[in-house]
Image (spheres, helix red, strand yellow):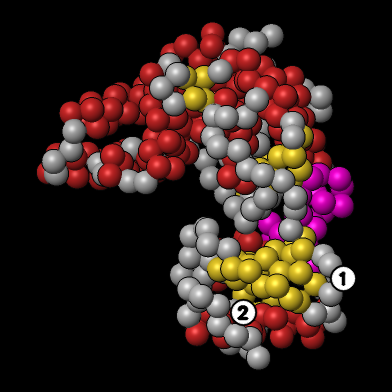
Amino acid sequence: MILARKGESMGEQIIIGEILHHITSTFRFQLDDIEPIQRGYQNRKWFAINDHGKKLFIKCYSSKRYPSEKMRFVRIALQIQSQLHEAGVVCPKLYGIDGKYIFETPSGFLFCMMDACDGDTIHPGEANWLQMFDLGRVTGYMHQVLNDFPKDRSYWSPTRLQLLKKWRMEWEKASTENCSIRIRFLLKRQREIIDSLQMQQFEECEQGWAHWDLWMENILFQGNLVSAILDFDRMKYVYPDLDIARAIMSGAFISQMGMDMRKVAAFIEGYRTYRPITKFQLARAFRLLWCKEAPWWYTADIEERSENPRRFFEEMCWLMEHWWELEDIFDIG
């Protein structure tokens, strides 16, 4: 019998009870010291210790956040993560049966289990240049391994129509609600950028498998070295350049100060250990990132939202402010 812990509902106890029973019957080991993780959005997560002393991470997927269509992509992503681990990429080892890593309990709860990795996350903008170098090296190696994976249909590409559709929605809200002058000014500036976009430039971007969520919250460090890349659930066949821009922005952009170019140069030097990258490719990667993320963060209510969305908003503002000089800014040899 599993005893309820402080802060846990009986419903949560039923879920973890079914999961633990499934794990015990499937993998023939016992789990102890079950510790709920109070972070993340909607999904339930736990740390546990098996009877061999191994610390494990268990994740139960929310049916609201991950309906069946999204879970199809998660299944593929976890299969790729397992192969990356086998190839030496620093990411958690998954536990699976016959190449399948998503399990279902009798009540229909979907979950996965993997090794818990040692290390700590770093707040955005606070990585040092040695950590950025190693992050670039690890990212470059991951992309090199992913380059050998079978091609797939592209999951996403930017279109002016979608950018304008989202912009009009937020502009209408800003026009009817009590938004600040700054938000209205930035929305006007966003429209100018959308109108001036040369969409054909993105046709030259290499397509391939990408982590697609490579920010500091999903990276563990031990000292100056990356100990693990986490959370591959969003992995898609899109543009690897997005990983480059997102990792640099998360690690090297400092709010109120701007981009730390020493950290940028360190990341690029590490990345080039395995793959080439030019200043034109880098500038285009940041414009691609803006097309992907600006619609998420340029919202009428952004100033009322929590710390992380506001951080992403400031990143997008910096890109928009320096839109026409990105090639000069990122001219790092």
- Foreground residue, 79 or 311? 311
Q: Is disc 2 placed on a helix, strand or loop?
A: helix
Residue 155 rendering spot, x and y as whole percentages = 57, 49
Mark 2 nearby-residue class (10 Å; few <14, some 14–19, many ≥20): many
The mark tally for this picture is 2
Q: Position of residue 270 (x, y in %)?
A: 76, 24
- Mark sitting earlier along the chain (1/2): 2
Residue at the location (48% across, 80% down)?
Answer: 9
Q: Does residue 99 appear in this view?
A: no
Name the quarter where the C terminus is drawn: top right
Q: What kind of residue is marked 1? A: His
Q: Which residue is mark 1?
A: 52
Alpha-carbon span between mark 1 and mark 2: 20 Å
In the image shown, does 69 or 129 lie closer to the viewer? 129
- Left or right of 172? Residue 224 is right
Give the residue displayed 54% in from the left and 8% down from the top.
Answer: 328
Closer to us: 297 or 128: 128
**Spot occupied by residue 24 in the image (x, y as percentages of width and height):** 78, 82
Q: Residues within 10 Å of mark 1 (few under 14, many from 20)?
A: few
Tell me if I can see residue 103 in this picture.
yes
Direction from residue 237 to residue 314 in the image, left or right = left
The N terminus sits in image quarter: bottom right
The region drawn magenta spans 76-95
- Kindly identify the amino acid type of the residue bearing the numbered disc 2: Ile
Q: Residue at x 80, y 35 (%)?
A: 141
Q: Secondary structure at mark 1?
A: loop
Location of residue 71 with respect to 283 vertically, above or below = below
Whether residue 172 appears in magenta in the rendering, the answer is no
- The correct choice, above or below, for 310 with respect to 278 in the image is below
User: According to the image, label 2 marks what residue?
Assistant: 16
Residue 167, horizontal then vertical, whole percent: 29, 39
